[in-house]
Image (tube, helix red, strand yellow):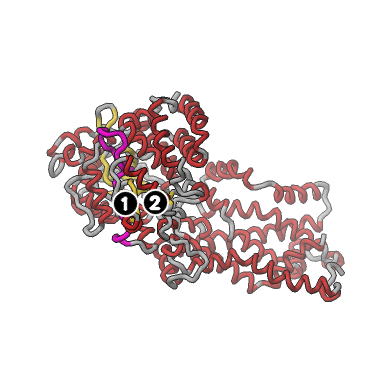
Amino acid sequence: MFGIISSTSFAGTLVINTDTSDAAPKEAFEYIIKKFEEENPDVTVKWNVFDHEGYKQSIRNFLNTDPPDVANWYAGNRMLPFVRAGLFEDVSDIWKDSGWVDGNLSENMEHAKKSMTIGGKQWGIPYTYYQWGVYYRKDLFTANGISVPTTWDDFVAACATLKAAGITPITIGSKYLWTTAGVFDYLNLRTNGYEFHMDLTLGKVPYTDPKVQAVFDKWDELVKPGYFLENHAALSWQEALTPMVNGEAAMYVMGNFAVAPLKEAGLRDSNLGFFQFPEITPGIPMAEEAPTDTVHIPSKAKNKTDAKRFLIFMSRADVQEEINKILGQLPINKNSSVKKGDPFLAAGLNMLNNAYAMAQFYDRDAPAQMASEGMKGFQEYMSNPDRRQKILERLEKVRQKVYK
Amino acid sequence: MFPTPIHQRPIINQYIYKIFLPISLIIWLIPIFGILMTSIRGLGDITAGNMWGTPSEFLLFSNLHDVFTNTPMIKYTLNSFKVTIPTMLGAVALSCMTGFALANYKFRTNLIIFFIFIAGNFVPFQILMIPVRDLTFKIGLYNTITGLVLFHVAFQTGFCTLFMRNFIKALPQELIEAARMDGASEFRIFWKIILPLTRPAIAALCVLIFTFIWNDYFWATVLIQGDHAMPITAGLKSLNGQWITAYHLLSTGSIVAAIPPVIMFFLMQKHFIAGLTLGATKG
């Protein structure tokens, strides 16, 4: 937090609050704000950077008491409480009106529209996301005669082959819990589909539902034969990279941020690969896990005209391209391209541009209390799959309490 | 004399001592050695699981460069000095006066006041976290160096008073009485007689308080939110990336953060040890 947020804003001043306290996101915003000011010399931007963690608390305060003109936040159910409380401005007109931008926004960001839509309206503009999927050791796959699995049966068979060869099929570090949610989300998205996953994270479906049981049946197929790294509960996600670097583990269900440390530790494009989480129930449209960062206009903003100009600016293909070059992530606008020569970004871009919908990750889609209990449950299940029934019953109790 | 010097002990004890001293020393130093080793590695080594082996690259200088360029580390260091030095001066100055008063003047509430100073030391500061945060917030000093300094001064004065009072109490009373007979004012006695005599205690206190406050992490994270006032101990966490725990940079940064108190310790080693034992044997 840099000093006190000014409550005085005169015409032509655009106040932007962001949680971009980490180096790369900060640099990205520095860049776009400078570019925006160059293109719009009549607007002066006043930018407040908040600490990433503290922002979650601060935004509740400032949206009510001292709203900026633009604030960054996250898509999907994370923005639901603010939309319900009437704190975010409806920006459906930006999404509808092709005259706002170079081309049609709804078309260019169609695949991300679902996660920006609540009650049939759009509440913000997404500007960056990154893919989740399976990162794997190409050389270990080749050595064991495995090709990239596209169906669940192939995937389980690949795990069996690797296990028989003395290689841990899937590494995971569940010390901080959230990694388990990545696996759960994908199993649920593939077994039951995006709509069911959203219903579950919105608290509309009990955790004891047969469809949730079906997810855990699939999970059983991986956990019971010991396809996950054995001592996962003792390791952070980062520490669980080590077996993969050393060739003792072959796959990791992870976000694209895992690529940088893996490469730094010596893996190359020749032995590190990425594939989409395989299909489980045939015919269910493939939704992906892609946590999306967004910009919004608080409904009490003072300078909505310039705020809208900024949102339109942020949706532009060229701007998204530049932001994401700095972030090392993916642009949402289909007309943007990514850094050449990065097969992981290229694969992710291709996968997400064709995705049916975007889930935001369990701890963003579900409310904080549910998410924290849920992830504890997932971790406990992965260590003791026999307790599954008890865990699900406990989560159901939490659900009834949280979504009252 | 207690404890008995080792060379007066039975020969077998002397051997046990000679064997176990280096062993326990090594065990004691392993974490520091680990930090030193990690500070010259790259993240690649750490991800590959090479924690204790030979570093594949010598990256101390590049790590140092990253520590100072990726984050406002110089600002954090300056902030640390801005917090530590005023606290040291404030707490020591106050406690010289309180110590003098409590040691020399006989008044009814003397002991009670003294006990209140001491009692402050026994309150675990986690209990104070929320009230202190609220207090500084209401005074308008939340998230400022002044707020942090004032709190540290208040909290450290308790210990310092105990220390100074006991030290002054042990000075020969005749000196003070002689001065009074000669017609010196109380302030003059304090300034011309007590202060020069307590110089070793003041030096020892300064060193102790400097290290205490420099190494404070808890209050820095409770009372400070922004880079503008963040001291180095709490600022180290900004070395982490968005996703990655940068163990190599954290180690390098920790070493940088440890340098001032270590220098202070070596320069004032004599006073430091005197300080630790002074309070223990007198009073």
Asked if residue A239 lies left or right of residue B119, the reply is left
Asked if residue B60 lies left or right of residue A123, the reply is right
Q: Do the residues labelled 2 and 1 touch (CB within 8 Å)?
A: yes
Q: Which of A250 and A367 is in front in this view?
A: A250
Disc 2 marks a residue whose amino acid type is Leu
Q: Residue A146 carries which label?
A: 1
Seen at 29% across and 35% down, the residue is A115
Looking at the rendered image, the quarter that the C terminus of chain A falls into is: top left
Asked if residue A19 lies left or right of residue A296, the reply is right
Q: Residue B40 at what x, y percent from top left?
A: 47, 69
Q: Residue B220 at what x, y percent from top left?
A: 54, 53
Q: Residue B245 at what x, y percent from top left?
A: 45, 56
Q: Does the magenta stretch include residue A279?
A: yes
Seen at 53% across and 51% down, the residue is B221
Residue span colored magenta: A268-293
Q: Can residue A175 be seen in this view?
A: no
Residue designated by label 2: A162
**Chain to which the residue tagged by mark 1 belongs:** A
**Magenta stretch prevailing secondary structure:** loop
Seen at 48% across and 30% down, the residue is A392
Q: Can residue B232 be seen in this view?
A: yes
Tag 2's secondary structure? helix
Q: Quadrant of residue A242?
A: bottom left
Q: Which of marks 2 and 1 is nearer the N terminus?
A: 1
Disc 1 marks a residue whose amino acid type is Ile
In the rendered image, the vertical position of residue B217 relative to residue A193, given as above or below = below
Q: Quadrant of residue B131?
A: top right
Neighbor class of circle 2 (other Cα within 10 Å; few <14, some 14-19, many 20+) is many
